[in-house]
Amino acid sequence: MSKVFVNIGLSLDGYMAPEGMTMENWEKPEYKNWGAKWGELMAWIINQQYFREHLMLEPGGETGPVNDLVRNTKERSGANIMGKRMFEQGEVSWPEEAPFNTPVYVLTHEKREPWIRPGGTTFYFVNDGRESALEQARESAGGRDIRIAGGADVIQQYLNLGVIDELEIALAPVLFGGGRRLFENLREPGPQFRIDKVLDGPAATHLRYVRQ
């Protein structure tokens, strides 16, 4: 049976995204540095050869265990689930060939026809809840795994459902001081995980937890 997993970057003080991270806030003085903070958080992946090839960036990049981790995350994913806020930001910033190449289920109250992109990505807009999105993702994943892509509130919802099997966290040595925390709004008792693997990289420590 396919597994449900999370694979995200996280700041040292526990934030998935800096304060005010929306395209509308790009020029606002109080949030003008969110782009720089996000860049520091994700610097580790930008330098990986597989990631650069997949996004058709300039050739080159690092190979090795971290690059293999990035490749494995992509290749194991048969479907993705995300929230409306993440989709709306990506809709205006992703390239024409969105970087998923799988069905993507967007949790939203908005009714909208599927949005088909080149390269195998189709966005489906789910209006009847997180359980429905997960069921549809399982059906379309073809035995591959399902990634809960984000944002933080969507990950929290699936943690509270008790369906997340694995957490893969790239912990970057940056401090945001505010933003969207990953581990908030969790019910008691919370889900239980054990450490499965730790991989040291020059720009992040890669932590893998599996459900007990």
Image: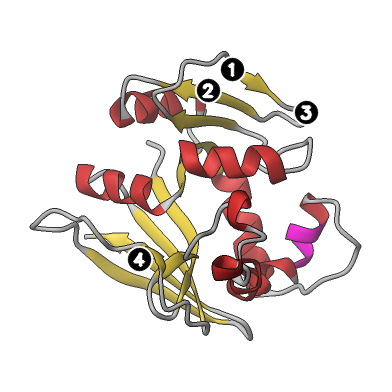
Q: Amino acid at mark 2?
A: Tyr
Comparing labels 4 and 2, the label whose residue is closer to the camera: 2
- Which of the two discs, 4 and 1, labels the residue nearer the N terminus? 1
Residue 19: give x, y in percent of width and height: 47, 65
Residue 186 occupies which quadrant of the picture? bottom left
Q: Relative to residue 80, is residue 151 depicted above or below?
A: below
Residue 14 occupies which quadrant of the picture? bottom left
- Asked if disc 2 and disc 1 are in contact, CB closer than 8 Å, the reply is yes
* C-alpha gap between disc 2 and disc 1: 5 Å
* C-alpha gap between disc 4 and disc 1: 33 Å
Residue 39: give x, y in percent of width and height: 66, 70
Mark number, residue 114 = 1
Q: Amino acid at mark 1?
A: Pro
Mark number, residue 6 = none
Comparing labels 4 and 1, the label whose residue is closer to the camera: 1
Helix, strand or loop at mark 4: strand
Q: Quadrant of the C terminus?
A: bottom left
* C-alpha gap between disc 1 and disc 3: 13 Å
- Which of the two discs, 2 and 3, labels the residue nearer the N terminus? 3
Q: State the extent of the magenta-drawn residues as a range.
A: 48-52
Tell me how the rendering is colored: secondary structure
* C-alpha gap between disc 4 and disc 2: 29 Å
- Asked if disc 1 and disc 3 are in contact, CB closer than 8 Å, the reply is no
Residue on which disc 3 sits: 118
Horizontal side, residue 41 vs residue 97: left or right: left
Helix, strand or loop at mark 3: loop
Neighbour tally class for label 3: few under 14, some 14-19, many 20 plus, Cα within 10 Å: few
Residue on which disc 4 sits: 209
Residue on which disc 2 sits: 124
Residue 28: give x, y in percent of width and height: 61, 62
